[in-house]
Image: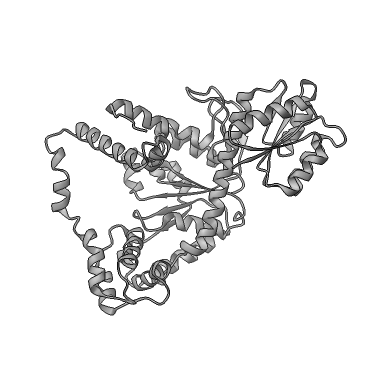
């Protein structure tokens, strides 16, 4: 549950905010002056403070400075009367998230809460991922290719140069990006990953650069983009080759100038971002076909890193297999030589991601202390059975359809599957599909899908 502290000397404002925010399932504390507010901050895990500028005893500006010094993870929204605009602007410069003028707009307050807590969720996810890196996402292997990548990572981390990471799906491109960030001077600042392929073309610019209220239909308030959220840290653009040419042009300008403009605004915002990008596509061919800007490519291609597929890392199969088995099956288990030979023979089209899933499957389905060849064969059976014959069978139901009809039929089938998996929870289903809930609603209407609750 997110926690809000209201510091205001007007009892009516404290009571109204407490009632409204409590109705939104926020935990709410109130204080009539800055001293009591600071005492609450010392004993309660507060996420957001609504702070009146004009307070008795200790002024709002001084309270804000103390919050910034002693509780840097707490966001502050300042509240100002019309006579205190200059002081409110000063508060923004000192690090306040936003400013509200009296009389207060309750809709604006609720929107700010949602935006701030979305940002906090992102920060928590980043902290969790950082903790997970040491336990679950180490760069494992001793092959020549991996050793070269480790060397380049160390060199790249010491600079702010852009890095373009290439390689097949499942090879660990994001892991390389996280390693660069984790070894850089920015390691304690945000690492913001963006899957460019998962965001609709009409929303990508809003996601990257943010927007102002009314910038487009549905823009009910100001939203910071990923460039702003990553300022001071690292922005990782995965699947960057899937961006539209329009978005590519804006990213190029942002990289060159380190300034952005939110959609619907003419204000130029300075950002300090280290940019890393990744793709599994042939960008040289895309440039030739006019699908990717050559000038952006060379801006990204300052430090190139190619992550080799697992089939080219044969000497890492044993190391990775033992590492994953230790994580999922316990340190005392091992592979027989016959089992390891079978693992080395398999081509691993899904690379590290597929290999990890297979080892996890083996650790669950086999109780052998020494994993046998038979256990490996059984675990690989599902992987190897997906040959041309099976794919052909799966496509039979689409055999008489044209391309667009088949696409719609498959999309409807997939949406139904995700809705059923999530109990027809639109938000969760949209997350699993990698699209926005509003897009999912549109598709549900398009395909006449009945939503059950």
* Relative vertical location of residue 105 with respect to residue 154 in this rendering, above or below: above
The percent coordinates of residue 10 (x first, y second) are: 78, 27
Q: How is this picture coloured?
A: one colour
* Relative vertical location of residue 188 with respect to residue 324 in this rendering, above or below: above
> In the image, is 164 to the left or to the right of 43?
left
Task: Pick the quarter of the image with the C terminus.
Answer: top left
Task: State whether residue 258 appears in this view.
Answer: no
Q: Residue furthest right?
A: 57
* Relative vertical location of residue 245 with respect to residue 164 in this rendering, above or below: above
The percent coordinates of residue 283 (x first, y second) are: 36, 47
Query: What is the quadrant of residue 397 in the picture?
Result: top left
The percent coordinates of residue 5 (x first, y second) are: 70, 38
The residue at 40%/46% (across/down) is 239
So how many labels did they put on this image?
Answer: 0
Query: What is the quadrant of residue 55 in the picture?
Result: top right
> In the image, is 357 to the left or to the right of 121?
left
Q: Which residue lies furthest to the left in this view?
A: 400
The residue at 62%/54% (across/down) is 188
> In the image, is 101 to the left or to the right of 392?
right
Task: State whether residue 339 appears in this view.
Answer: yes
39 and 298: which is toward the camera: 39
Task: Pick the quarter of the image with the N terminus.
Answer: top right
> In the image, is 39 to the left or to the right of 225?
right
375 and 291: which is toward the camera: 375
Query: What is the quadrant of residue 305 in the picture?
Result: bottom left
């Amino acid at each position: 549950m997110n926690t809000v502290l209201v510091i205001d000397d007007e009892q009516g404002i404290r009571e109204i905010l407490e009632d409204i925010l409590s109705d939104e399932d926020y935990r709410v504390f109130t204080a009539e002056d800055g001293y009591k507010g600071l005492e609450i901050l010392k004993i309660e895990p507060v996420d957001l403070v609504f702070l009146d500028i004009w307070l008795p005893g200790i002024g709002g500006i001084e309270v804000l400075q103390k919050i910034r010094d002693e509780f840097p993870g707490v966001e502050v929204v300042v509240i100002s009367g019309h006579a205190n605009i200059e002081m409110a602007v000063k508060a923004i410069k000192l690090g306040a998230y936003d400013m509200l003028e009296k009389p207060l707009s309750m809709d604006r307050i609720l929107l700010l809460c949602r935006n701030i807590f979305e940002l906090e969720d992102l920060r928590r996810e980043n902290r969790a991922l950082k903790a997970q890196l040491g336990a679950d996402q180490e760069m494992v292997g001793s092959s020549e290719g991996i050793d070269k990548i480790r060397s380049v990572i160390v060199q790249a981390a010491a600079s702010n140069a852009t890095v373009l990471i290439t390689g097949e799906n499942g090879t660990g491109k994001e892991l390389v990006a996280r390693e660069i960030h984790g070894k850089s001077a920015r390691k304690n600042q945000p690492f913001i990953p963006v899957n460019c392929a998962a965001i609709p073309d009409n929303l990508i610019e809003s996601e990257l650069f943010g927007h102002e209220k009314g910038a487009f239909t549905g823009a009910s308030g100001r939203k910071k983009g990923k460039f702003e959220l990553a300022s001071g840290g690292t922005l990782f653009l995965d699947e960057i080759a899937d961006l539209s040419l329009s978005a590519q042009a804006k990213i190029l300008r942002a990289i060159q100038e380190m300034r952005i403009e939110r959609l619907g605004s003419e204000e130029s915002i300075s950002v300090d971002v280290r940019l890393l990008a990744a793709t599994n596509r042939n960008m040289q061919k895309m440039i030739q076909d006019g699908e990717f800007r050559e000038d952006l490519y060379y801006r990204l291609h300052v430090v190139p890193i190619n992550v080799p597929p697992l089939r080219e890392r044969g000497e890492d199969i044993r190391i990775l297999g033992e590492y994953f088995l230790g994580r999922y099956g316990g340190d005392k288990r091992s592979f027989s030589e016959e089992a390891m030979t079978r693992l080395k023979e398999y081509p691993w089209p899904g690379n590290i991601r597929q290999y990890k899933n297979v080892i996890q499957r083996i650790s669950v389905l086999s109780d052998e202390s020494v994993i046998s060849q038979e256990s490996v064969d059984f675990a690989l059976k599902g992987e190897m059975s997906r040959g041309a014959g099976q794919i052909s069978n799966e496509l039979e139901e689409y055999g008489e359809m044209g391309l667009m009809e088949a696409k719609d039929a498959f999309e409807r089938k997939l949406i139904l599957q995700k809705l059923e998996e999530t109990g027809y929870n639109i938000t969760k289903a949209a997350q699993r599909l990698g699209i926005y809930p509003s897009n999912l609603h549109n598709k549900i209407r398009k395909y006449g899908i009945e939503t059950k609750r």
